[in-house]
Amino acid sequence: MSNSIQAIRGMNDQLPGELACWQQLEQTAAEVFRLFGYREIRLPVVEKTELFARSIGQSTDIVEKEMYTFQDRNGDQLSLRPEGTAGVVRAMLQHGLLHNAIQRVWYAGAMFRHERPQKGRYRQFHQIGVEAYGMSEADLDVEIISMTSQLWKQLGLSGVALEINTLGTAESRKTYRSALVEYYQANRESLDEDSLRRLDKNPLRILDSKNDAVIELNKKAPDILEYLDNDSKEHFQRVQVLLDKLAISFTRNPKLVRGLDYYGRTVFEWTTDKLGAQSAICGGGRYDALVEKLGGKPVPAAGFAIGMERLIELLKIEQLCQPEKRQDIYIVQTSDTALELGLSMAMEFRDAGFSVTGNIGDTSFKSQLKKANKSNARLALIIGDNELQTNSITVKLLDDGTQLTVSRDNLLAETSKYLANME
Ligand code: AMP
């Protein structure tokens, strides 16, 4: 074992038996998104590094120190995608999908960030998210928030909390930024190293510092609400009114700034107190300036991304994961003639929608039954010499060992009845 190759730190295998909850989440989300009129989009995992630098922002943690960046054989500078939004905007522009058009799309897939791995924080992780283009009104912000809340409902999840904030427009943020810098400069002695580094490049990020002294300092920091232009103020107000109308409870968190530069106006996050330090399960907001920044005409946009590992962990804690579907039938066949019958029987059952494994190799009856038990199937259908002679099949209920003989003609009907009763 010592010289066998291991997976890369922070990148997890997802083994059979661990995926039922993932599939449940993927299917539920796809269905909820369909109900809201969103269509799936699938994009490459690798993009030009410049795409992320220009969109997420040069001075963000992601671009500064977390991207998997490399030169390919042509000398092009490429990166594994650390998030989904930049790629979606790139694709929208490349294929001309934003000309006088409204777009609503969703995606799911692996993202890569070279962070310090810990519970709930991985280097390869998965997001499922939506993006919508061509709508500047607050209704859209509320539409995407209500999609998340509908998804929690479908999954049976309660007890997650919605926090919202506004980051205003680029202009109002600039004035706010100056006020913040002034405040922090006057209180430099309370800033830790990380915050001092951010002071020049990205002072808004100091607001979500986890350092105790900085948290204390932030309590009296200027609030962006006082620096908002009128349109942004009204927009934020409207978001709150509509959320109230939909009975989606929220709190305003003035310290919520999110780690990506492209956000403006509404930002939001769903958090839980069940997952320890990595409490955010979903983050998103409006990014009206991004399309233009990536070379298009200005197109308003908003979206969110759910961290799938964290949401699955929460579903497990809340016991909301449905168990993996059991296999229906294992066919035990003890001769070549039996095997031939078994093969066609298996197809017949699959046509009827039952999951079937036929024994492969190993003709001993005893060891085949052992395999049948191990397979966790509900029923074994046994075809031995006796059964071949009498044109019947022995049906064994593997949970309690009951055996019965069923004529070949009635087999599908009888077996279906047993399986239906076992649901
Ligand atoms: P972000 O793209 O940073 O806005 O993140 C959106 C969501 O993705 C977060 O709320 C987390 O649930 C999840 N997430 C972000 N980074 C990681 C990571 N390194 N490992 C696991 N989940 C992550």
Image: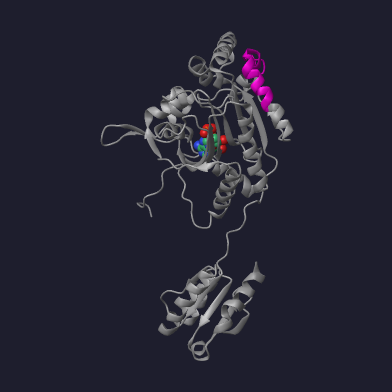
Q: 209 or 321, which lies in front?
A: 321
- Is 244 magenta? The answer is no
Q: Decide if residue 42 is on the left or right side of residue 318.
A: left
Q: Is residue 367 visible?
A: no
Q: 306 or 132, which lies in front?
A: 132
Q: Which residue is at 52% across, 77% downward?
A: 369
Q: Main secondary structure of the magenta part?
A: helix
Quadrant including the N terminus = bottom left
Q: Which residue is at 42% across, 74% downward?
A: 360
Using the image, determine if residue 303 lies above or below residue 206.
below
Q: Which residue is at 66% across, 51% downward?
A: 319
User: For residue 249, which quarter of the picture?
Assistant: top right
Q: Decide if residue 228 is on the left or right side of residue 40.
A: right
Residue 370 rendering spot, x and y as whole percentages: 51, 75
Quadrant including the C terminus = bottom right
Q: Decide if residue 216 is on the left or right side of residue 262.
A: right
Residue 222 rendering spot, x and y as whole percentages: 64, 14
Using the image, determine if residue 360 lies above or below residue 143.
below
Residue 66 rendering spot, x and y as whole percentages: 44, 31
Number of numbered markers: 0
Q: Is residue 184 visible?
A: yes
Identity of the residue furthest to the left in this view: 74
Q: 14 or 367, which lies in front?
A: 14
Q: Decide if residue 117 is on the left or right side of residue 323.
A: left
Using the image, determine if residue 60 lies above or below residue 322.
above
- Is 231 magenta? The answer is yes
In magenta, the rendered stretch is 219-239
